[in-house]
Image: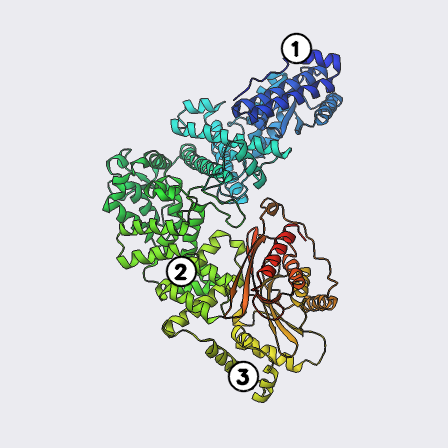
Amino acid sequence: MTEALSFPDFDQLTQDASQQGLKKSLSAFLNNATLQLDNAFRNGTPIRKLIQARAKIIDQLLTVAWQQLGFDEEISLIAVGGYGRGELHPQSDIDLLLLLSDANAEKYQTQISELLTLLWDLKLNVGHSVRTPQQCAEIAAHDITVVTSLMECRTLCGNEDLRAQMLELIAPENIWNAADFFIAKRDEQSARHKRHGINEYDLEPNIKESPGGLRDIHTIIWVAKRYFRADSVAELRHKALFSDQEYRDLRKGEELLWRVRYGAHLLAGRPQEKLQFDHQRELAELFGYEDNDERLAVEQFMQHYYRTVMQLRLINEVLMRHLEETILGGTSKEPITPINKQLQCRGRYLEVTHKRVFLENPSTLLEIFLEYGKNADVEGIRASTIRLIHSQCDLIDENFRADPNNRSLFMQIFQLTYRLSTTLQRMTRYGVLGKYLPEFDKIIGQMQHDLFHIYPVDVHTLQVLKNIRRLGRTNGQKEFPMPASVFQKMERKELVLIAALYHDIAKGRGGCHSTLGAVDIRNFAEHHGFTKREVNLLAWLVQNHLLMSQTSQKQDLTDPEVINKFAVKVQDMQHLDMLYVLTVADINATNPSLWNSWKASLMNQLYLEASKAFARGLENPADRKQRIKETREEALDILAARGFTPKEVFALWSNLGDDYFLRESAIDIAWHTEAIDEYNSDQPLILIRSNESNAAEGVTQIFIRTLDRDHTFAAIAAALDQVHLSIHDARLYTSAGGYTLDTFYVLDHNDQPIGHDEARFRLIRETINKELDLRDNYSDIVQRRTPRQLKHFPIATSTRLSHNLERGHSILEVTTADRAGLLASIGRIFVEFGIRVQNARIATLGERVEDIFFITDQSGSPLINEELAESLQQQIRQRIDQHI
């Protein structure tokens, strides 16, 4: 429901100013108008009407003030920039130019000062400049932003001739001709896109500056106005700059961005161009979206937003390329290289040979992308052809998809040596990929409202493909040496690429996306020439694409039983190779900032252990006793080379249990043993090193041998938090001699090992010793400011307890919001309940952490006492959520 807007007319406002005083009357007028506009926005009044109404309100306010302050005809008040276009949002800048007939600004100094003071007192965001027409032209000649702002101007008060003089001086024949202006604006847009991310899919997009945002619309209009000497968008439409559909899409997209921007300003109470998480949720509700069984309201809203900016970016791409061809010229003189009857190259751009190509031969809708991907000399596709693709991609229907020739063309695209990712991105943007794969169309712009998934599903999917292809390039080989080696040996690389395309295809549908996606890929593969074995392999990969990630991060990879179960499920080396490559690419495309050397080492360890299982034969699973025997023998050999006798070594090992030799590497056992032998103090032994053990590549190890105390884990966790180290794995062993041998795997706040820094090592040792000595008198847990984004994702703490009676421990899983001091808090609760920690695995997933603790009661048994188990979990949930 919309409502009529009613404001005092000019005469009434002038009368009020005379009777009540200028500031008081204008303040009341502005407050009343703002309240009406904001209510109208919430009630669904068309946004174009609202932002134009706000501009007219400010026009009226300024006109009354101008007259009341007694300016003469030798000076003009000019609206420039967005205000000059007649568009104002609640917190937009009101950009004013006070245009003088001569350079004697001192004559108006008092009046100008009074005007600006009044506007600032009214809390308006005013930007101003005082210049003559000649001064405007001189500055504009050297500053593209100034000439752009001045192009969009209108006289509010004063002498209209002054504005006409200025416009004549800044006209294209005097400064910034159409070609120079286009080049400058094109470069400005390119730099802006890089500054705000090269794609339109930021989690918190900038409504104005991000690709596909309002600035992309403005840039088209500015360039076109400069060339066509047009005063309005309607006039540009008559110049045939836009197709009818482009014009409708542009207006519709602009209105959505205006509505979102208006709402962001209104909710923030200040100029807010970034669509922040909290505002996303509020706007989704305001715009009438509702949660359903499949997706949150905010996810539906943001998919609409992302699809709109993708459409606007396409229009910008087409029109900027069209304007480039029109303004810079030269295309008619460029050499034409025939490709076939349907396609040709004009210079470095592909185009169709005539306008009916797609109608007469629809397969060309795929063939043109195949040619683009194959030809490294081709820079892109001509604007006129992009328009045809976008307008005629509805030709891709069931009959098209069933055509064997089209299926063959699609698979040839996936066999491209270069440009696969870029080709698929263009196919998505131009509407072709979503038409050929309707299941893919559903995930375009589909986001997940969290900090773990930083891209919508379609962008994430194409990034996975890009990451896989990188493994065959030099930079990928350096960054991911082991996955790259595995990928390069694959014979049918397109299999893992197709699996990547489908691994998240069913996100947002409800149900298990892995299971639904496996059905989709099976259907695709059966119709695209894959063998029965390959169809089953692809379906298995999609069904199990999370298996390797979950196993590596949540389970004990030193346990032969874990490895054996994983290997049995994976079946063979071909499945393992493809799952490994897909998993590494997937994690890095989900959120590259969450990938670190520790996760890489876990993934590599699982791959190598599973490879050994296949080499050994699944019928001959690894045995714990054999594994312990082999580790002891290897460690003994290392120590013997360092001068130790077997008798000395066995004496040092006499109090250590089997778990220690099962879970620690021979290299680390030798390191610990040698240090313990040399250490003669009653104080805790603390060893620190980075990147020396194959088992812990890319991570810092902290080994602590100290007297066995209930609070050891809690104390060390608190100490490491104080020195800004994050724990990713912790292993605690109690010896028969009354000591604990504890290994913590840590990274710094940049997710990097801390390197060899003796001063920092000393601080770590001192802090650990201090915390161990405090016993029950713990230091206050470090309180740090929670990042703004994390505050918008409240996560209720959940717990799950299970038991491994064979291994003699319970497994406690804690999922909660990430925050400083979390492990230390949980450690204190463990102390209160007499819980002993054997092992801890820590996984941070955006705003969420998933901590897994392998624990026993004080007697070293699993927590089979149901009352104790439930009470422990209840305390963890309550106290973490209370930030204790």
Q: According to the image, label 2 marks what residue?
A: 579
The residue positioned 57% from the left and 41% from the top of the image is 277
The residue positioned 72% from the left and 77% from the top of the image is 682
> Toward the viewer: 100 or 636?
636
Q: Earlier in the sequence, mark 3 or mark 2?
A: 2
Q: Disc 2 vs disc 1: Cβ atoms closer than 8 Å?
A: no
The chosen color scheme is rainbow
Q: Disc 3 vs disc 2: Cβ atoms closer than 8 Å?
A: no
**Label 1 secondary element:** helix
Q: According to the image, label 1 marks what residue?
A: 11
Question: Which label sits on residue 864?
Answer: none
Q: According to the image, label 3 marks what residue?
A: 636
In this orientation, does residue 453 appear? yes
Label 2 to label 1: alpha-carbon separation: 75 Å
Q: Residue 341 appears at what percent x and percent y? A: 24, 40
Q: Position of 138 compared to 620: left or right? A: right
The residue positioned 30% from the left and 52% from the top of the image is 525
Crowd band around label 2 with a 10 angstrom C-alpha radius: few (<14), some (14–19), many (20+): many
